[in-house]
Image (cartoon, grey):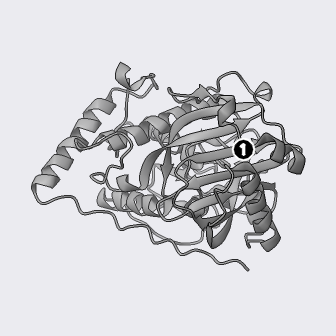
Amino acid sequence: LVSHGSGGFWFPYLVENMDRVGPWAKATYDAFLSEMRASPFYKPGSVNKDVPGGECVRMRDVLVFDDLPRRPPVPNWAPPDMRKLGTDELPPLDDLFDAYGVHISGGWGFRAPVVEMPGYLRALHKRVADGGGKFEKRQLTSLTDAAPHNADVVVNCAGLGNHERHGRLARDPALYPIRGQVVKVKAPHVQQVFVADLDGFTSYAIPRGDCVIIGGTHDDDQWDIMPDRDEAEAIMKRAAAFLPRGYLDNAEILGHWSGLRPARRGGARLELDDEPDGKGRRVVHCYGHGGAGVTCSWGCADEVVDICRDCVKDTPMAVARPRVDDRDQSNNAVRTGADVRSSKSAQILKDWILKSVKKGGVAPTPKPQEPLPQER
């Protein structure tokens, strides 16, 4: 599962069709923020340990360096606090240009969620199970096999399982892998997210509770998931040239990881397929988000739920987490288009938290204990 090893940083990355991605990203940003604020004990900059998985989400300062003339003035996914970086915040430009021929003319600064994916995935798993969901692990040869014959709707989130190379599920010729490799280091002084993604140069540092993710690569149509020693050295060399001087001087390498992002030419597929097998079974496809899976997650989930509701209008479907409509002026609010269920859902979650605390506290989600794949 590529999400397990990802940096979990909210940022539209390696994904097409920004007209759709922008609203998904905004809705997801607001969802993470809403989850953190659902606790009556929440303080800005802290984590919310009262919500399952909440201790795995933290807002961090982000610096994204770019060649601004090549980009839109303000992207459609921009957080409310996005600002242009000053010249004093740019990396050592002479070193970068001399070593890589990279030109950085500016960049953006903002705060964004960073998600500790191993622990967050466990919390989501528990949330579904607590809500009555069941999990079954088996190999599928077609979408027809994905659910019992009496199922009204199948939601297909199988990622690269829909690639035509595998000969099953959607067999989508537009789907392709983007191989990514990162190095995990111990560098507790790194508390900001740094990103540079330019033509011919990619480097980033994403702090997590247990390590800092140093990346990375994006190799189209590559299926090899074994970490490469030469690539790991190149990743660290680029980061040393890009990050503030001395940031990685004493960093201890903890491990190496590589995985495949499920990308799709033309953008992610999120749509209803009425009869993919000719038997009347309706399928909602949701895959192909490239490097923006975490960034689009809750926004896409909302859209999938809306489609499913239309398919089974007589079946009540619960809202599993709070959503936001309008953030107040003190939080630099922007309207996201989320519906009126949001305030009620948030209040229900707050009431549940307070009730649990009075009974002796909410059981904390286990601290992420991700096994680090070693370099080979």
Q: Is residue 367 left or right of residue 362?
A: right
Nearer to us in this view, 75 or 318 = 75
Above or below for 266 versus 48: above
Q: Quadrant of residue 129?
A: bottom left
Position of residue 50 measured from the top left corner of the image (x, y, whole percent): 27, 52
Residue, x 56% and y 28% (percent of image)? 82
Above or below for 329 versus 261: above
Q: In this view, does 266 lie to the left or right of 254?
A: right
Q: Is residue 349 left or right of residue 209?
A: left
Is there any visible trace of residue 12 in the rendered image? Answer: yes
Residue, x 35% and y 68% (percent of image)? 366
Q: In which quarter of the image is residue 257?
A: bottom right
Position of residue 94 measured from the top left corner of the image (x, y, whole percent): 83, 42
Task: Check the image and name the residue furthest to the left.
Answer: 358
Q: Report crowding for label 1: few under 14, some 14 to 19, many 20 or more residues within 10 A (C-alpha).
A: many
Position of residue 117 measured from the top left corner of the image (x, y, whole percent): 50, 59
Q: What amino acid is found at the position of numbered circle 1 in the picture? A: Ala
Q: Give the residue number, with chain letter if any, for mark 1.
A: 196
Placement of the N terminus among the 4 image quadrants? bottom right
Above or below for 5 versus 341: below
Nearer to us in this view, 152 or 331 = 331
Residue, x 58% and y 51% (percent of image)? 279
Q: Is mark 1 on a helix, strand or loop?
A: strand
Placement of the C terminus among the 4 image quadrants? bottom right
Nearer to us in this view, 318 or 278 = 318
Q: Quadrant of residue 158?
A: bottom right
Position of residue 24 measured from the top left corner of the image (x, y, whole percent): 55, 35
Q: How many marks?
A: 1
Q: In this view, does 375 lie to the left or right of 93?
A: left
Is there any visible trace of residue 271 in the rendered image? Answer: no
